[in-house]
Image: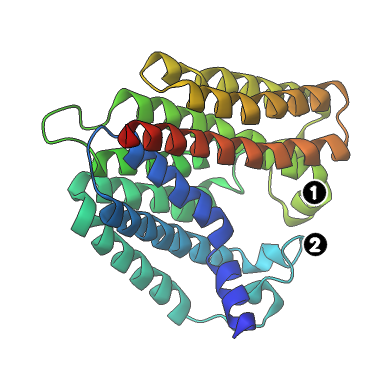
Amino acid sequence: MLTAINMTVSILKLRIGTFIALAAVVGVMTGGGELGVIKALVFAVAVLGASGAAGGFNQYYERVSDRMMARTHQRPFASGLLKEGFIWPLSFLALLSGSLLMAWSVGGTLATLLVFMGALTYGVIYTVWLKRRTVWNVVIGGAAGSFAVLAGAAAAAPQFGPVIAPIPLVLSAVLFLWTPPHFWALAVARTEDYRRAGIPMLPAVSGPDVWAPTIFLHVAALVALSFVPLLLGLGPVYGLMAAIGGLPFLWASYRLFREPTKGNAMRTFRWSLVQFATLSAGVILDQAIRWAW
């Protein structure tokens, strides 16, 4: 049973999917309406399912290149534990269809379209089209997470008001800027993997004189932008959480800029996860306090 659960988590990339679903919750809580706890949870599960479908297709499509990378060669499709077959793309399509239907049932047409765009961006535009063709693959692919914030905001939009409120628009931009340095920092530590697989991640095709300042500038921009919601109505709890996660992430990326080592790259990668989690927690706590009062 535990083996089956772990395999499912791996195939559907549910660890990444959890972050995407959390981004959708952030969108719901800053969307300006009152979706309701149950409907919000249903919508988050729908986003998790759509993300899982895209992640599963990503693993199936990349099973050959995954065998060339130490980090991914034990994945079920790459290792041969699961045999290739048309049943897998069909299964992922069925999961996506069910997830979109679930999203539509509580969030409406626009929110569902945005969920679909997120899955399409990661599953097709990034995986099939961009990943092996351009060094800017994760920059454009980063839109996948941004769509989740916008989808949540659209699902929770009030009947009379903006379709997507200003705060989730800003937070979606923060997430768009977050994705490249998150993956680039990991790629610095796994450069040989990406070169062996022929994937042109920025650190695999350029030197630290290019990727180190690029990572730092992305982090500086996203951390600065993460404080803009304070001007749009979020309170001090959010600001405190944005600082707790953002400033160490900025410092880690600065250290990587000054000393471009694999150790500093992994510290930057880990702090990127902390920054995302604390920023999301800041939104949730801030809105929960407002609703309690």
Determine whether, in the image, residue 170 is placed left or right of residue 246: left
Q: Quadrant of residue 110?
A: top left
Q: Amino acid at mark 2?
A: Ala
Q: Residue furthest left?
A: 160
Identify the residue at horizontal 66%, vertical 83% (top origin): 81
Note whether 97 is above or below 251 in the view shown: below
Classed neighbour count for the residue bearing mark 2: other residues with Cα under 10 Å, few (<14), some (14–19), many (≥20): few
Name the mark on residue 190: 1
Note whether 255 is above or below 157 in the view shown: above
Q: How many marks?
A: 2
Classed neighbour count for the residue bearing mark 1: other residues with Cα under 10 Å, few (<14), some (14–19), many (≥20): some
Q: What secondary structure is found at the residue carrying circle 1?
A: loop
Dot 2 or dot 1, earlier in sequence: 2
Q: Quadrant of residue 50?
A: bottom left
Identify the residue at horizontal 86%, vertical 40% (top origin): 262
Q: Are marks 2 and 1 in contact (CB under 8 Å)?
A: yes
Name the mark on residue 70: 2
Q: Quadrant of residue 167?
A: top left
